[in-house]
Image (tube, grey):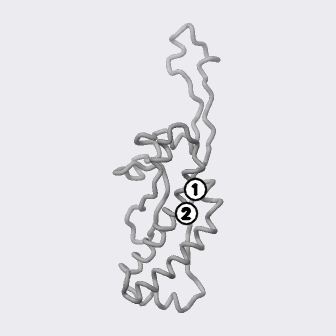
Amino acid sequence: MARLKVSIEGDKRIIAKLSSLEKKARNKVFREAVKKTMKQNLLPSVRRALPKRTGTLQKMTKARAMARSRKHVGYYVMNAPAGLTKKQGMSFAGQAYYGGMIEYGTGPRSVKNARYVPEINAKTANRGSVPAGLYYTRVYKQRRITLRNRIEARIKKNLEAAIRGGP
């Protein structure tokens, strides 16, 4: 999965304000900025790029929070049914279990017991493979500079609100 890192450098006033906040408030500023940007900017673009037959894959594609970490604060957009963690293979679970296959592709697909069935020979047993679509990755790479700029702007806005003590 592609990663976007935002580092705030250069603006000494903002860095001073960030360091004046306690860690919990600082993480809240980052988390809210990233969440809003992902939901408003990246999620609709990914849903438009996905192939549509029944619409299930678009409905199941969501922006989810990353696992709790002391180092990272963030969100990701993926075919992610509620309640599953990344280690449980989110892109291959739920109603749209085929989302991972569309994104990453598959190896050669064949009939498992072709050698035991005389009507099916090795040539007809191979059904080909699904090529990797990389829909999520492609949209992210196209929009990452815009996303970074919007996240930085939202961080500045949320930081000002946190310093004032308002929502």
Above or below for 105 versus 16: above
Give the x, y percent position of residue 124: 62, 17
What residue do we see at 42% from left, 42% from top? 93
Image quadrant holding the C terminus, namely bottom left
Direction from residue 103 to residue 31 in the image, left or right? left
Q: Which residue is labeled 2 in the image?
A: 41
Residue type at numbered disc 2: Asn
Residue farthest to the left, as pictured: 83
**Quadrant of res 12:** bottom right
Above or below for 133 versus 157: above
Q: Nearer the viewer, residue 26 or 123?
A: 26
Crowd class of label 1 (few under 14; some 14 to 19; many from 20; radius 10 Å) = some
Check if mark 1's residue and mark 2's residue have beta carbons within 8 Å: yes
Direction from residue 25 to residue 91 in the image, left or right? right
Point out which mark residue 45 bears.
1
What residue do we see at 60% from left, 73% from top? 149
Image quadrant holding the N terminus, namely bottom right
Q: Nearer the viewer, residue 98 or 23?
A: 98
Give the x, y percent position of residue 76: 48, 59
